[in-house]
Structures are given as structure tokens and as C-alpha cells.
């Protein structure tokens, strides 16, 4: 247990004050790129305005021989680019790897003021977050970083899932959690070789027809990730962190990718990873609330006046609870509209609507 009163005290002398609240910024897509790849580095300025979050990946998918080149590439990219209001994140190597200590030392002391969030893979319990928390404070003090770097954990081991609430509550730096379906499947010994998404074998089937037992029986694929997503969303909402769906590996199947992202959106996630430029647009579409829902929610809020009692709108009962649901939709719409002019128009928000309170 950490003393909650100490949450506002830096963990090292000279480190910045830890945040009281996590800044909620649009993060519909966390776009991954390999910073060791010089062809990618050249494209970074063009990608920055297209993505809510740009993430330099140092962990899995980076060849062991390229780990140092990726770290150096990331530092150079951080120095060379202006990220504007796009967030710049980094996924460090896992805490049991030989690279992670140098990742943290170099990144925080050299470009700590440019990095918004550090994504930590394979987090298993609060102890992993405590380790990173203290180390970050020491390095922020050393590197004269002016504001706390936030921490994002990937939920990708069975132990991590068992401890998800404690992970979320382990530090005021905890910004959010992503589901990591590939590592999680391996850790649980699930029998799927896919990166996220459904599986044709995981299904339910209608009962046989007693009069025609050999007739075709319809089936429906089920979502292998539903349980974990639900736990992750609750743990995040309970602690003021943000939940994200992670990677969808089948780049050639944009329809199933969109479905998986939408399930996550409907359950409360704020974004997903994009592993390919095509997935940026899918995430943008899915994690921006549907315009008709935002317009409907605005109408309910307006007709509900002070937000108490009941009214009937188009045959649907509205009360104190539905108005809260509608506020979630409208507040999310405003957040997106402040960054994305196309959606501001689709939602019919005026400049005045979008002013910060
Ligand atoms: C992501 O890192 C995953 O393992 O799915
Ligand atoms: Mg992983």
C-alpha cells in the first residue's frame, strides 16, 4: 500500500510534482512506428498531424540487433520534430530485458521534456509500476524534466490481468492501460495464433430443430477478449485511467479490425493501436462518437433542462441517468471536435460550444 497523501509528493528530490488528474486528450489511435527505420523517420513530420498519438516502438517487433539503433533513432526524432498537439509516446523494452535501463536513462535525461507517456510492456503487478515510478522521478530530476512523464501499462500476462486494479492504482502517473492480446494469449496458453480479433472456433450454435435434427444450425462467433476488456475498462474507470484496445494484427482485414475497435469503443475504450497507416483512419472513424448519437445526446441534454426528472423524447424515456450517458457522448464529441475540424462540423458544435470551461 502507498500512502495516498504522498501521491502528490515527488519520489525524488528535484522531480516535478506528480499529476493530480490525468489529462484527457484525444487518443483515438496510438500509431506505432519503428524508429530504427530511417525511411520511417523521414515520414514522421507527415504522420504527426494525422495521428492523435505517435509512438516510437522499442520493444517487440524490433529486431534484437536494432534495439540500440531504435533508441538512438527515437532520441533524434524527438529532437528534430515539433509534435504540436500530437502526443509523443514511447514503448520501452520490458522490465526483464537488458535494454530497458538504458532506454529509460537515455530517453528521460535527453528528451524527457518531449515525451508525454512511457508505455511499459508486460506489467504484472503494482511492483512493476513502483519501480518505473521511482526511476522516472530520479531521472526527471537529473534531466531537469519540467512535468511528470505519464505511464501506460500493457495488460498482456495472466498475472497482470489478475492484478489490473492494483496496477491502475499504483501511481499518480498511471495514464492508462492497453490490452495486449498477442502476449496475453501466449501467457494464458490460449490456442489462437492471431493478434486480437475473433476466432472461428470460439462460437455459440443454435439448438437443433427437433423435427429436422440434420438441418443447418446457425452459429455466431464470440469475442475472445470480452472478459479482459470488461475488467480493464472497470479498473481504469474506477481509478481515473484511460482504457485502450491494443493491436489488430490482420492488416488485410479492415472490416474485422473495425468491428474489434468498435466493440472496444462501445465498452468504454478511448482508442486503439494502429500498426499500419490504414488503421489510423479506421480508429479515427470508430473512436469519434457517431454524429447522429452526438446530435441526439445534445437534444436530450437540452430537453432535460436541469437534468432531473423524466421526459419522453420520440417515445424513449429519459431521466437523470440517461442525461449522464448523453453527457459522456457530448463531452467525448467536444474533445474530438477541438482537435478534428471535420468532426466539429459533423457534430454541429459552434466555436463557443468548444471553449474550455
Ligand atoms: C502487444 O504487445 C501484444 O502482445 O498484443
Ligand atoms: Mg506484447
Image (cartoon, rainbow, N blue to C red):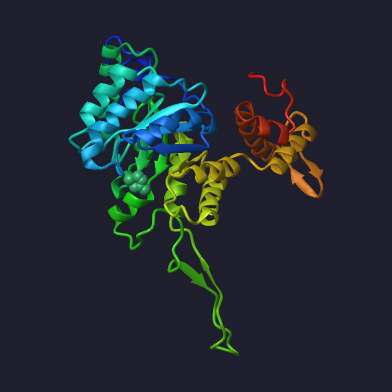
Q: Nearer the viewer, residue 137 or 256?
A: 256
Q: Is residue 91 above or below residue 113?
A: below
Point 38% across, 23% down: residue: 78
Quadrant occupied by the C terminus: top right
Q: Is residue 162 above or below residue 309?
A: below
Quadrant occupied by the N terminus: top left
Point 54% across, 43% down: residue: 283
Residue 169 visible to an observer of this rendering: no
In the image, is 140 to the left or to the right of 284? left
The image quadrant that residue 177 belongs to is top left
Q: Position of residue 4 (x, y in %)?
A: 36, 23
Q: Nearer the viewer, residue 251 or 158?
A: 251
Point 46% across, 25% down: residue: 22
In the image, is 339 to the left or to the right of 163? right
The image quadrant that residue 141 belongs to is top left
Residue 298 visible to an observer of this rendering: yes
The image quadrant that residue 18 belongs to is top left
Q: Position of residue 87 (x, y in %)?
A: 46, 27
Quadrant where ligand 2 appears: top left
Q: Position of residue 297 (x, y in %)?
A: 72, 38
Amino acid at each position: 500500500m502507498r500512502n495516498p497523501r504522498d501521491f502528490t509528493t515527488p519520489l525524488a528530490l528535484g522531480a516535478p510534482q506528480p499529476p493530480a488528474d490525468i489529462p484527457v486528450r484525444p487518443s483515438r489511435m496510438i500509431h506505432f512506428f519503428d524508429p530504427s527505420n530511417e525511411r520511417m523517420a523521414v515520414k514522421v513530420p507527415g504522420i504527426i498531424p494525422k495521428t492523435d498519438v505517435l509512438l516510437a516502438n522499442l520493444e517487440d517487433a524490433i529486431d534484437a540487433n536494432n534495439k540500440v539503433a531504435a533508441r538512438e533513432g527515437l532520441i533524434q526524432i524527438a529532437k528534430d520534430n515539433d509534435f504540436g498537439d500530437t502526443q509523443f509516446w514511447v514503448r520501452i523494452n520490458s522490465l526483464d530485458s537488458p535494454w530497458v535501463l538504458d532506454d529509460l536513462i537515455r530517453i528521460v535525461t535527453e528528451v524527457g521534456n518531449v515525451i508525454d507517456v512511457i508505455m511499459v510492456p508486460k506489467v504484472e503487478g503494482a511492483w512493476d509500476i513502483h519501480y518505473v515510478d521511482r526511476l522516472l522521478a530520479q531521472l526527471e530530476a537529473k534531466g531537469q524534466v519540467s512535468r511528470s512523464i505519464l505511464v501506460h501499462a500493457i495488460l498482456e500476462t495472466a498475472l497482470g490481468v489478475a492484478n489490473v486494479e492494483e496496477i491502475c492504482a499504483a501511481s499518480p502517473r498511471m495514464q492508462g492501460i492497453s490490452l495486449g492480446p498477442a502476449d496475453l494469449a501466449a501467457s494464458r496458453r490460449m490456442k489462437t495464433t492471431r493478434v486480437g480479433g475473433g476466432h472461428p472456433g470460439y462460437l455459440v450454435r443454435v439448438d437443433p430443430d427437433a423435427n429436422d435434427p440434420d438441418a443447418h444450425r446457425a452459429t455466431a462467433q464470440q469475442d475472445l477478449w470480452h472478459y479482459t476488456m470488461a475488467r480493464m475498462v472497470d479498473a481504469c474507470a474506477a481509478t481515473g485511467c484511460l482504457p485502450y484496445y491494443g493491436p489488430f494484427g490482420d492488416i488485410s482485414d479492415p472490416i474485422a479490425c473495425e468491428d474489434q475497435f468498435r466493440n472496444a469503443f462501445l465498452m468504454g475504450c478511448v482508442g486503439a493501436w494502429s500498426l499500419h497507416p490504414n488503421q489510423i483512419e479506421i480508429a479515427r472513424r470508430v473512436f469519434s462518437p457517431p454524429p447522429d448519437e452526438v446530435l441526439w445526446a445534445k437534444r436530450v441534454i437540452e430537453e432535460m433542462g436541469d437534468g432531473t426528472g423524466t421526459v419522453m423524447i420520440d417515445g424513449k424515456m429519459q431521466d437523470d441517468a440517461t442525461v449522464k450517458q448523453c453527457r459522456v457522448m457530448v463531452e467525448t464529441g467536444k474533445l474530438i471536435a477541438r482537435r478534428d475540424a471535420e468532426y466539429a462540423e459533423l457534430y454541429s458544435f459552434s466555436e463557443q460550444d468548444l471553449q474550455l470551461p
